[in-house]
Amino acid sequence: MNNANTIDMLMVASLSTFVIAGLITAGMANAIVTGAAIGGIYMLTK
């Protein structure tokens, strides 16, 4: 349970990084699509 919790927190940090990086480079749409794709893949493979 603790290990899964750590993985969840890492995923949230990764998604946040993608979104922030996208906003900084003015690639808002790309950041949202990338975040959604990674989030979707993560949920499917969880």
Image (cartoon, rainbow, N blue to C red):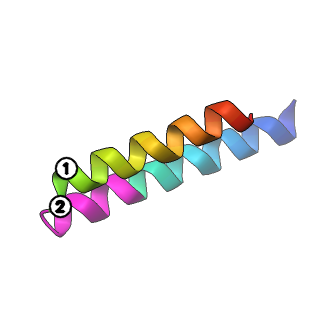
Per the rendered image, the range of residues in magenta is: 18-26
Q: Quadrant of residue 42?
A: top right
Give residue 3's position: percent from left, percent from top: 85, 42
Q: Quadrant of the C terminus?
A: top right
Amino acid identity at mark 2: Gly
Q: Which residue lies at the image location 18% right of the left edge and 53% below the top edge?
A: 28
Q: Which residue lies at the image location 29% right of the left edge and 53% below the top edge?
A: 31
Q: Quadrant of the N terminus?
A: top right
Rendered image: mark on residue 29: 1
The reply to whether the magenta stretch includes residue 39 is no
Rendered image: mark on residue 11: none
Mark 1 Cα-neighbour bin, 10 Å: few <14, some 14–19, many ≥20:
few
Q: Quadrant of residue 45?
A: top right
Give residue 22's position: percent from left, percent from top: 25, 61
Give residue 37's position: percent from left, percent from top: 46, 44
Circle 2 sits on which residue? Answer: 27
Q: Which residue lies at the image location 41% right of the left edge and 40% below the top edge?
A: 36
Q: Are marks 1 and 2 in contact (CB under 8 Å)?
A: yes
